[in-house]
Image (tube, helix red, strand yellow):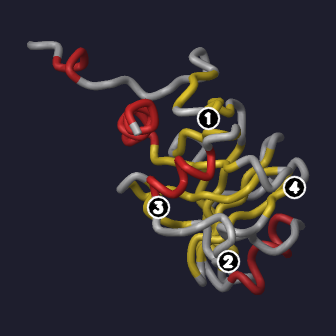
């Protein structure tokens, strides 16, 4: 069988911890636990994960565990430690929990060229407020929000598309 793998750009991996793209340092964040919560968010995130309300594009996520808003009834819980949520249906909160630890490649972007890169990648401006972190970034579905500081953008991109996003950032 032919090996078609060499025709594709590989996804950035934890071993390739950093690369530069147009005045922006891009770091692959390793070792995060991630869980998708689907259901009425007014009940699910706080009770199940014991964390603050989910952040959107304009929000700054802080702490070792936080939630990211995807839609009105969906959020992503991200933690530096293992998430203590039982996978499956939680009848009391009417919320489904799905572990997605390997579904996303997580990238932290920072540097003097960040505003320019964001303006090329999406129609949103850093000053735009959005309750959801879900957006098209370089034509790919991503979650984008600020992490710890307003000048650090964290992206969650689906693993199969991470190579394409990294290549776009290098060429942007």
Count of marks, rendered view: 4
Q: Which residue is mark 3?
A: 122
From this view, report whether residue 55 is shown above or below residue 152: below
Circle 1 crowding by C-alpha within 10 Å: few under 14, some 14–19, many from 20? many
Q: Which residue is mark 4?
A: 62
Please tell me which of labels 1 and 4 falls first in the chain: 1
Circle 2 crowding by C-alpha within 10 Å: few under 14, some 14–19, many from 20? few
Residue 169 found in image quarter: top left
Circle 4 crowding by C-alpha within 10 Å: few under 14, some 14–19, many from 20? some
The quarter of the image holding the C terminus is top left
Please tell me which of labels 4 and 3 falls first in the chain: 4
Query: Which residue corresponds to the image point at 50% horizontal and 26% vertical from the top-left?
Result: 12
Give the Cα separation between the discs numbered 3 and 2.
Answer: 14 Å
From this view, report whether residue 53 is shown above or below residue 88: below
From this view, report whether residue 111 is shown above or below residue 125: above
Give the Cα separation between the discs numbered 2 and 4.
Answer: 17 Å
Are the two marked residues, 2 and 1, in contact with CB atoms closer than 8 angstroms?
no
Q: Secondary structure at mark 2?
A: loop
Q: Which residue is mark 1?
A: 24
Q: Secondary structure at mark 1?
A: strand
Query: Which residue corresponds to the image point at 53% horizontal and 44% vertical from the top-left?
Result: 104
Circle 3 crowding by C-alpha within 10 Å: few under 14, some 14–19, many from 20? some
Q: Position of residue 145 (x, y in %)?
A: 68, 59
């Amino acid at each position: 069988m032919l090996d078609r793998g060499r025709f594709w750009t590989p996804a950035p991996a934890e071993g390739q911890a950093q690369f530069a793209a147009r005045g922006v340092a891009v770091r692959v964040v390793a070792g995060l636990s991630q869980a998708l919560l689907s259901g009425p968010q007014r009940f699910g995130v706080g009770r199940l994960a014991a964390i603050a309300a989910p952040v959107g594009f304009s929000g700054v996520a802080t702490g070792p565990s936080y939630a990211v808003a995807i839609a009105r009834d969906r959020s992503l819980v991200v933690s530096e430690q293992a998430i203590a949520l039982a996978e499956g249906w939680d009848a009391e909160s009417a919320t489904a929990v799905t572990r997605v630890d390997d579904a996303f490649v997580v990238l932290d972007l920072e540097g003097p060229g960040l505003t320019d890169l964001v303006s090329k990648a999406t129609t949103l401006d850093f000053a735009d407020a959005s309750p959801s972190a879900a957006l098209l970034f370089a034509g790919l579905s991503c979650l984008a929000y600020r992490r710890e500081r307003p000048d650090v953008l964290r992206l969650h991109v689906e693993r199969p598309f991470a190579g394409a996003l990294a290549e776009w950032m290098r060429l942007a």
